Amino acid sequence: MVVDAPFTTKDWGMIAVATVVPCGYAFVSYMYLKDSEYMKWFQSLKKPRWMQSSSECQATCEAVLMSSVCCGTYLAYKHSEGFTTSGSKLAVAALSGFAGLQVFARVFFLYCHNLPMFAGLMAVSTAVLTTLSYAFHGIHPLAGTLVMPAAVCSFCGVCGLTQMAIEERKSSKGDEAN
């Protein structure tokens, strides 16, 4: 029985490049944000017990999850001849939407400190990641599978952010009553 190997030698090189980009982004954002006012604000929020609050853990999780999305993107790109097949249009739209949402959501969270808006954007991001996983699965099953952990973690983030927003609203109403 011959098993078709999912990766060639060239693929491993491309996957290494696809992994370096999100890892570099996570490292730079960690170095930039670790002592910032944003982290002080974030640390002061009441978080669910299961939600990690350390910036090191957040940067590591983001690097791992975005690396899997980038690897899945490369596999989908490779197996759709550069996203030129008819089935890859949904994948390109979802990937573009996800990238745009990531940048847009950061503004609300980092600079506006708007938890409800960020939770809403993360919910949309979760839907886009799920769509991306579905679209990639149609191109190459492993590509779709690689995106799924990011969608699941995004959903968990939405749950945590929603709970944090509710707690923040309760505490602000309690402050107004006093």
Image (tube, rainbow, N blue to C red):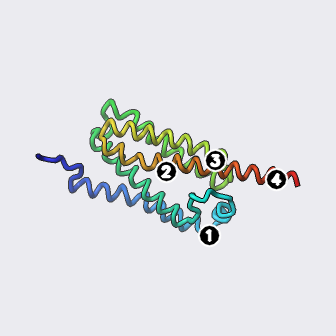
Q: Helix, strand or loop at disc 1?
A: loop
Q: Circle 2: is it few (<14), some (14-19), or many (20+) Cα within 10 Å?
A: some
Towards the viewer: 89 or 46: 46
Can you identify the residue that label 2 sits on? 153
Q: Which residue is mark 1?
A: 35
The type of residue carrying mark 1 is: Asp
Q: Secondary structure at mark 4?
A: helix
| Cα distance between the residues tagged 1 and 4 | 29 Å
Q: CA distance from mark 2 to mark 3?
A: 14 Å
**Image check: 19 left or right of 32?**
left
Residue 48 position within the rendered picture, expressed as x and y whole percent measured from the top left: 62, 56
Location of mark 3 (residue): 162
The residue that appears at 40% across and 33% down in the rendered structure is 90
Badge 2 amino acid = Cys
- Between 49 and 56, the residue placed more toward the observer is 49
Name the outermost residue toward the right: 178
User: Where 132 sits versus 170, above or below?
Assistant: above
| Residue found at x 81% / y 50% | 173
- The reply to whether the C-beta atoms of the residues labelled 2 and 1 are less than 8 Å apart is no
**Lower sequence index among marks 2 and 3:** 2
Q: Secondary structure at mark 3?
A: helix
Find disc 4 in the rendering and name its residue: 174
User: What's the amino acid at mark 3?
Assistant: Thr
Counting every numbered tag in the picture gives 4
Q: CA distance from mark 2 to mark 1?
A: 25 Å
